[in-house]
Amino acid sequence: MKNTLFIKKLKIDQTVANDMVITVYEFVSTKPGKTVYLQSSVHGAELQGNAVIYELFNYLKEVDFCGKIILVPLANPYASSQKSGTYTHGRFNPVTGDNWNRMYLDLCSLDQEQGGIDFKKFIESHGEKSAQEINKDFKKVIRKGFETYLKYHRDYGIDENKSLFIELQRLASEADIVLDLHTGARATRYIYSPECQEDKMKDINFPHYIVIPNEFGGAMDEASFMPWFKLSENFKKENIDYQYDFESYTVELGNEEVIDMDAAKNDAVNILNLLHQRDVLKDRPKVKKTKQYKCSLKDYKSYYAKAAGLCEYHIKPGEHFKENDLLCSIYKMDRLDERNAVTEIRALTSGIVIHQTPSASVKKGMELIQVFSNPVTL
């Protein structure tokens, strides 16, 4: 029997002129299984995730799978419409100046009257229950947390930085796997994974992985995994063996402002490989195994411009370099007659270039390159 497709239109914001709506596609199998949630374009210029969702949408119309898969392309239409000339600015809220991807709600740090999670109470009532029952009931607690938060703030209104992102969190709250699709400005493909998922992350089959602390920093992946991580930690304090079955990642898909459908096919296959490994898909996709490297967040280093000028990059995203290799040169066009007309930026260690600023025109102190310093092979 074919999978069932549900299409929902959700009003998530409004301007003076009109309402803003996101489209949610839900594929539901006749077979029980995990729920998977994917969203893209929280930052307006980060478009490749939409191409990946397009590939996944067409694949899921025919393939046999278990559970439910939720696809949300163009998750932040407000950001996608922020154009200046030909460039899409949509990384920051133009009213408040806040990063759109730092606006999610941390249910673990809120007071209970605002929707915070009472871990002690939950464990007292679930210490004897199965992991399956715990997982099901804890999702209900998370969803209730959002309802309580909205109710608590109803009289005075919800901060515009929260209204959209609480809705996205509510959509993701029923999932067992959450993938937030992004891009860099000019970047390779890489994954942000918390330390608590380090043994699972490589199943996505991406080349590069940044391992971040098990902490909340405002992003969707952190907002998603932190309640489950905290639940597990609280069970440990009570000497109860509970292994949660949840994963969330930020998935970085190359350069902003472009889509590449050929690359999207490969990106989709790599994501489908994860779903096969998690028993969502029966058939394994044809994956071309890539060489994988990881780096801890503390070793994910940035090089900054030591002078203003025009910057030429000598190492591309995804390329390896050795200590003392020339990473970039900054040309000071107002000092061509001087000996220091060119400033060189050389590598302090061996590593891999992950991300570059896209503009050749840089000011002193601007971040130029982000790199894996002394990466580890997986």
Image (cartoon, grey):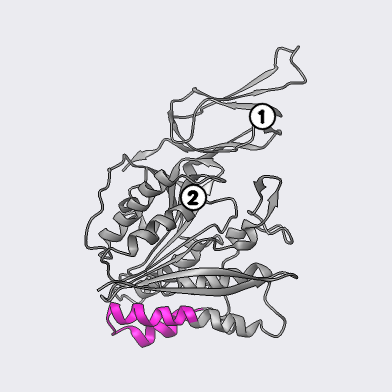
> In the visual, does 119 lie left or right of 44?
left
Within-10-Å neighbours for mark 2: few <14, some 14–19, many 20+: many
Frontmost of labels 1 and 2 is 2
Residue at 68% x, 59% y is: 93
Q: Residues within 10 Å of mark 1 (few under 14, many from 20)?
A: some
Could you tell me residue 36's position as x and y percent?
A: 38, 67
* Residue in view at x 40 percent, y 79 percent: 138
Precedes in sequence: disc 1 or disc 2: 2
Front residue of 87/95: it is 87
Residue with the mark numbered 2: 48
Residue 262, magenta (yes or no): no
| Location of residue 293 with respect to 40 vertically, above or below | above
Q: Secondary structure at mark 2?
A: helix
| Helix, strand or loop: magenta stretch | helix
Question: Eyeballing the image, is 136 above or below 100?
Answer: below
The residue to which callout 1 is attached is 306
Image coords of residue 139 (percent x, y): 41, 78
Task: Name the quadrant of the C terminus.
Answer: top left
CB atoms of marks 1 and 2 within 8 Å? no
Is residue 218 visible in the rendered image? The answer is yes
Q: Position of residue 129 (x, y in %)?
A: 29, 84
For the record, the magenta segment spans 117-143
Residue found farthest to the left: 283
Q: Type of residue at label 2?
A: Gln
Residue 177: mark in rendering: none
- Magenta-colored stretch includes residue 135: yes
Towards the viewer: 356 or 13? 13
